[in-house]
Image (tube, coloured by chain):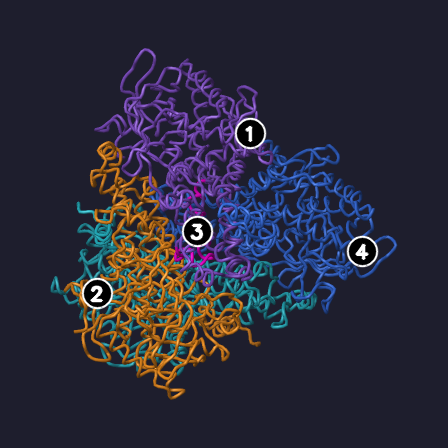
Chain colours: A cyan, B orange, C blue, D purple
């Protein structure tokens, strides 16, 4: 059976071999039990739990193009524009449910990009990467894996190509070739959900040249390989999760979280059947570009978080007793307008998606870049408007425990109350949610990740420039201006 | 045969009965021969000429849902999301070709809105409006008519409803009922392309109440009805078209134009078979809203004009010799980004369109409003960036005739030259195009019409507020913040 | 001698009577020793330390208008437009030095507003508030006090005036009158630097009416009055200050901090000589408006923080090795442009300041509101651009202690290095600074406080509307349009 | 007596020798009688008429620093920061009165820049340019001249310096040296008010190098020199001024206008006493930069036009009957906010002005560039908001003459009326004013000239980058981040 429950997913993480996970100077005994990591697991687990829920099953599951079995949509090869649209529907839904990053998109996007790239390599070079990858993906579907799509290298000196770096490890590369596989070394930075994954799908991070052949490698390794070390990334307000782990933990603002880590590969062996590119540097561009296309579409998830932000703004207005003020209503309309503009862009790049030679569907790349470019701007403005509507209390609220201290509890009840639509404590909870969305752990995902995930804004601008067909537009202008010359 | 050629269209306008058209204080003898009007006819004629052109035939024509004949897409009842998408494709194409308003969209949008509304009225009241309208539309398709969808009334005191106005004429209304039809009176303002039309399809302008029954009227009349008077709207730089009507007319910036007029109905008789709503005030809202939805989608045409603006910017940079400056390149990327964001919104509202009870397809209304709201902003910023890139010469260039005067021609050749990519005169032509797009006749369409056409920005904001499902979003926020209360 | 050193200031805080300060559920034994509070004291102490420093003495000190002695500028009654300008110069300087809120402005602004208001009350009612206040201020100058200007009440139901509230305590009010003074009760919210103060200067929070007389009270009480309770406000990432209090504490991003607290007055006695308004409700508007004017000017401090943000962006570009990219340079120019635009507004409202009847100078109120309104927008955009330039590492960096663990330190050295301009650890430090400025404790001051301090954006818009002289502008338009009518 | 009346100014223009002025292919007989030019003279004449008016005399006149006589402020050498402030006060006033460009600022700014530059040249080279210039300026003050500050050359190939151009005439240069003077040749483009001037003050357009010596020339020539040709620049809607020159001319929107022309110098002799720089290429940068500084400050005039735009918006709201709508009020506040932000920047750069070695005062250059940079953005947004509030009628109104035709007049009265606050004709006049401000002749000044006058936006960004003291800011960031390294 190809679908895990949320509970089975949590259990499956515990069944992995011991993993070397460092957090803030310490090697963790059981990462899955750490309150900070637990919050991030809560988000990933939603991708399983909602698939169990009859209300969301259709959104979350589909029929495998490889096996015909019912699978989680996160493992799916998109078979149509409608499939691409259903992908973003699922992502918006999850954003609405957890208000942060649920970490499973990167793997889905890596699946689709590797699928189409491996096909094209095989066409040119007669290799069998595509078959290998299909087998791998069948297993991923069957076992309902979370797979970390690992792309971003450390990069060292940005002015030098991989093969020119003084220390080659700043790009993941092959250090040894054996009969039955290769050994890789290096690190992947900013790895979303890495420690909550079953597998890691390694991909090259940039378009490469012939000299860079040893760096042009795509392959899969288990997340619990003993030669892998994880160093956990800190997030704003992360330790609030540790303040009252078994209680309500209200200062945390939410029980959900994201996760970023550095993955260090210290001579990890990869068996041949898990290698999907080995030296075909001329296809690194295709893999990177198509992954970027898929992943820029994926930022549709932020419209789900935006829905939460808009809802929080509307509630804050009510709890503060000013929901009828025209400027408040106008700001909520503006938030909605910005959020739906992002959504429209992701819808458009989905429906204009086209079939690849390998058979799956790829988004319209220009529109996917337009989508992501807006995502580098609008969530910041939505968050600003949310802070405007919420009021300064989001940064001056006392600690949750002051509600438990009898010496202060009554004062808080008296002085933190707003309108009669909410108790002081409910208002407090809402302010903590808004703090979390705009300054805390969720802000990491909603703001900074919106800026830099799937490529920084300038990366999209370069693609927009490339795909903008300026020559055709110049002809249009010349025709109307009646200019005959060159 | 259902398709006219461009030539036949021009001839068909001449075959109309004499029309009372006033322009700047004068009654025009033959409106179709006036240079200002000719320019606007050039734009409409493109909708026929491109339909003749094998390269564009597929974009411009389709198969009638009523008769199965090949018809111009402007007469079409949209049969699918793909049809809605093809509609905006056609509009972008025409914007690219003429860089201004081609005036035929209003009729198309009125067709689809009246079709679905008349069906619903009949369902409730057992009337036969829908059949009447289908017959009318068959004729429109067959004769390949340009139809002016006439909605906006004069409105008088904005605080009063139609039936409360001191002078009822400020809303078009029925003044007399005869056995075979009714007589209407009033005026429609801001009528795009009215004088270039064969027919006028009158619609109510707002949602009405029971007292307003005599104002709740939808019907069709021939544009050349003798009881109709047209008063031509002036546009920025309109008379430049009259300066050199038989020459190159370079100061005009383009041979294409738009057209706005006031239509005054002084007791115009409408036969029963051309009445599609008569008193069913409870359906005025549906007609207005669905027309607004279609017409807000139609502003996709501005992305075609935007393509011309982007092309003009790129050319200007070349002609000025600064196309490699990074800030220039970045501004062109920004223009492209904004233009494609608008496009993405119109694509999205098309593909999310749904089948109406009457059988044609209606756009997604929320996304159509999002689309139009962006159109009230982005063209202004694109125009600003275009002026930035073009340089001050767009407003300091001498007259075209100074190129013909031997005493000044040489000076202009010498001092107006930019890079070696263009002659002084080509650079002059380009500057005139840009002046036209940002300050002249085309700016009327690209800017002010983008602001107010299909409803002013606030109209969209009200719809966004209504369609934004705030209650659902508040629940999302409460779930994450763990707020249990109401 | 009227100037304390930084050391003396710190000592003076310890000499206060025991204060009831609750933080996150606990009553603190010695607030001045708590790492979170210490950071906030570091910022206030700068206002003393720089006054000692010959390089900054001129900026930080001036000659008292009351006594002719050299005093700290924070205690000064502004005597000229130049004085108003020097005030913002000092504030920008301090922003540059600590990158956060130094908490002493509110008192300075309260001094100047109370000075001019008490004078006007006396003129009308023959009271002696002004003399009382001058004596109080002489003492404040002499003792070089930090005074918390306490204005914002809890407000309860925003739709009711103070005297209409079910619980009168939601506005500070007089509960008892004695021969030698009055007793007050209530709370002040969002009190910046309250616990680092020597005194509290209580002011009414809104313009009041006759029924509200008992709420129209301005007075001073010592910060260590035993009937006062403080409840400490939490800030994003506050507890990072507690992780390594005696070490480098690098995860904190900065050794400086701000401070917000709720002050609860439970029947605090105020002797007559410390009462500066008692029932003169008709002057509450003047006090609130003039305080708001001064305090909106004070947001010039954010340009100092902006300087740090711009410097951090420039460094990040260098450390990442991309300081020559044209888009990076352009973004830094934009940050500078926005920052200097805010600065220009605060300069302008200073130089257009005018002498009050009481003799001190008040800023131009329209321009002060323009200034603050920009402050509610531009820091958010500067922070967004800073995150853009810095890169995603600001939210994925491991903890500082991972640098101390030998198992991970080497990996970090290897993989976190950027260009040769900085070590991995320096780059780490910079990223923590940027995290702090955009998401952490400093973001509370740089963003949310910029939004809501000295009045939320809508408060400024109302003032802009009132002060905008629309009637004059309508006349200008009519004159040019040649409209003679009303 | 040093002050001309408006009437005397108009007469003085007629007294000039015959001038070679070409407009749209024709040599004009008497330029001062052409309706288009007359409108531009109306604007310049205001600078004399308001100086006669007791209400404005203080704003418009001052005491000469050279002679102690009362002079028009446009001829003044600024003697203090307060003088710099009074300069912008005068400019805002004039913008309010004519709503367009009054053309006399360039000369004033050229005076001050040439004054300080000639002083510095003399200090280095022992020349006597400064004395010459003082004598010239005394005459200008005494005769109350309008002087055209002529800077912008044709520039030819932007990639080559003046001495490298194939045709040297694309930069004004010396072609012959005589005992008593020099002969110059070339052209100046975009010359504001050239034909309404008494004199032309020629300045180099860029910073030059040694090879460019023959191009490094500053000098004065009479505007009516027979070897000068003017080619008049067309503006949007210019010919509307010719439609009803002796009537109300309502379609023109305003009786005021701006003026741009190309000035061609065909071997014009300049006597030695009118030469203020001849070959001192190392001072071209100072002249250009200081002129740019003064002239960027001068864009304060646009805040006066902005006042008219805001007034027009408020009137339009009233005439349309929607002045109480909250979104309308909010947009007017936003327009005011943007307008006052520009104003604050010009106030700030004035008060932070400093004394030059020559003795006059120069604005703060960083803040003057900040000011102008905002002017390249905000008027466009103000104009957009004005169009939003005004409604689509600004581009669909019939011609003014339709009000005179009895067949249409009554219809217009009936259907163009809005609220009872204005007649149809007053509403029409207002719409024409708004059309003029946003698309017509006034838009040339309010928009495009705001973009490109005194240097295009990128020119300001380069200066902001140069003056931004980034090194200091990097140190601030390092101090707070505790980074010790380089």
Residue D377 sits inside the magenta stretch: yes
Per the model, the C-alpha gap separating discs 1 and 4 is 60 Å
Indicate the secondary structure of the residue bearing disc 3: helix
| Picture quadrant where residue B363 is located | bottom left
Residue that mark 3 sits on: D432
In the drawing, does residue C169 fall left or right of residue A464? right
Residue pushed farthest bottom?
B126
Which of C359/D425 is in front?
D425
Q: Tell me the subunit letter for badge 3.
A: D
Circle 4/circle 3 CB separation < 8 Å: no
In this view, C51 is above or below A272: above
Residue that mark 2 sits on: B9
Per the model, the C-alpha gap separating discs 4 and 3 is 66 Å
In this view, D298 is above or below B234: above
* Viewer-nearest of discs 2 and 4: 2
Which of D415/B337 is in front?
D415
Residue pushed farthest top?
D179
Q: For the point 36% across and 32% down, which residue is it?
A: D30
Q: Position of residue C93 (x, y in %)?
A: 56, 39
Residue D26 sits inside the magenta stretch: no
Badge 3, how many Cα within 10 Å: few under 14, some, many 20+?
many
Indicate the secondary structure of the residue bearing disc 1: strand
Quick check: do tags 4 and 3 share a chain? no
Per the model, the C-alpha gap separating discs 2 and 4 is 91 Å
| Residue span colored magenta | D372-398
Residue that mark 1 sits on: D61
In this view, D94 is above or below D269: below
């Amino acid at each position: 059976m190809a679908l895990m429950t949320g509970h089975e997913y949590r259990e499956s993480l515990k069944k992995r071999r011991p993993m070397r996970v460092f957090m803030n100077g310490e090697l963790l005994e059981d990462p899955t039990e750490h309150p900070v990591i637990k919050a991030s697991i809560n988000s990933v687990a939603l991708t399983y739990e909602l698939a169990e829920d009859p209300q969301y099953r259709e959104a979350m599951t589909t029929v495998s193009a490889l096996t015909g079995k019912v699978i989680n949509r996160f493992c799916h090869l998109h078979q149509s524009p409608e499939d691409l649209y259903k992908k973003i529907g699922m992502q918006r839904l999850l954003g609405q449910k957890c208000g942060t990053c649920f970490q499973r998109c990167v793997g889905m996007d890596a699946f689709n990009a590797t699928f189409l790239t491996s096909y094209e390599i095989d066409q040119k070079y007669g290799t069998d990467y595509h078959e290998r990858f299909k087998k791998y993906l069948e297993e991923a579907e069957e076992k309902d894996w979370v797979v970390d799509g690992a792309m971003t290298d450390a990069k060292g000196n940005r002015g030098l190509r991989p093969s020119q770096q003084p220390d080659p490890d700043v790009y993941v590369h092959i250090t040894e070739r054996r009969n039955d596989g290769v050994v890789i070394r290096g690190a992947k930075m900013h790895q979303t959900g890495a420690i909550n994954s079953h597998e890691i799908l390694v991909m090259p991070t940039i378009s490469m040249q012939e000299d860079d052949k040893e760096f042009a490698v795509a392959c899969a390794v288990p997340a619990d390989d003993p030669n892998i070390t994880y160093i956990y990334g800190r997030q704003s307000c992360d330790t609030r999760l540790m303040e009252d782990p078994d209680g309500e933990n209200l200062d945390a603002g939410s029980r959900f979280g994201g996760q970023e880590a550095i993955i260090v590969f210290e001579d990890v062996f990869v068996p041949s059947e898990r290698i999907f590119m080995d030296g075909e540097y001329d296809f690194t561009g295709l893999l990177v570009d198509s992954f970027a296309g898929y992943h820029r579409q994926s930022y549709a998830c932020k419209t789900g978080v935006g829905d939460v932000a808009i809802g929080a703004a509307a509630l804050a207005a009510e709890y503060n007793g000013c929901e009828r003020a025209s400027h408040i209503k106008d700001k909520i309309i503006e938030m909605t307008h910005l959020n739906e503009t992002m959504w429209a862009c992701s819808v458009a790049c989905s429906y204009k998606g086209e079939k690849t030679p390998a058979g799956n569907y790829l988004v319209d790349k220009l529109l996917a870049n337009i989508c992501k470019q807006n995502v580098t701007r609008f969530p910041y403005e939505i968050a600003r408007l949310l802070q405007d509507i919420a009021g300064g209390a989001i940064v001056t609220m006392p600690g949750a425990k002051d509600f438990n201290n009898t010496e202060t509890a009554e004062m808080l009840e008296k002085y933190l109350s707003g309108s009669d639509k909410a108790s002081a404590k409910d208002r407090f909870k809402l302010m903590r949610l808004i703090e979390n969305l705009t300054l805390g752990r969720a802000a990491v995902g909603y703001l900074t990740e919106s800026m830099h995930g799937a490529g920084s804004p300038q990366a999209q601008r370069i693609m927009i420039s490339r795909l903008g067909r300026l020559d055709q537009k110049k002809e249009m202008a010349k025709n109307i201006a009646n200019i005959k010359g060159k």
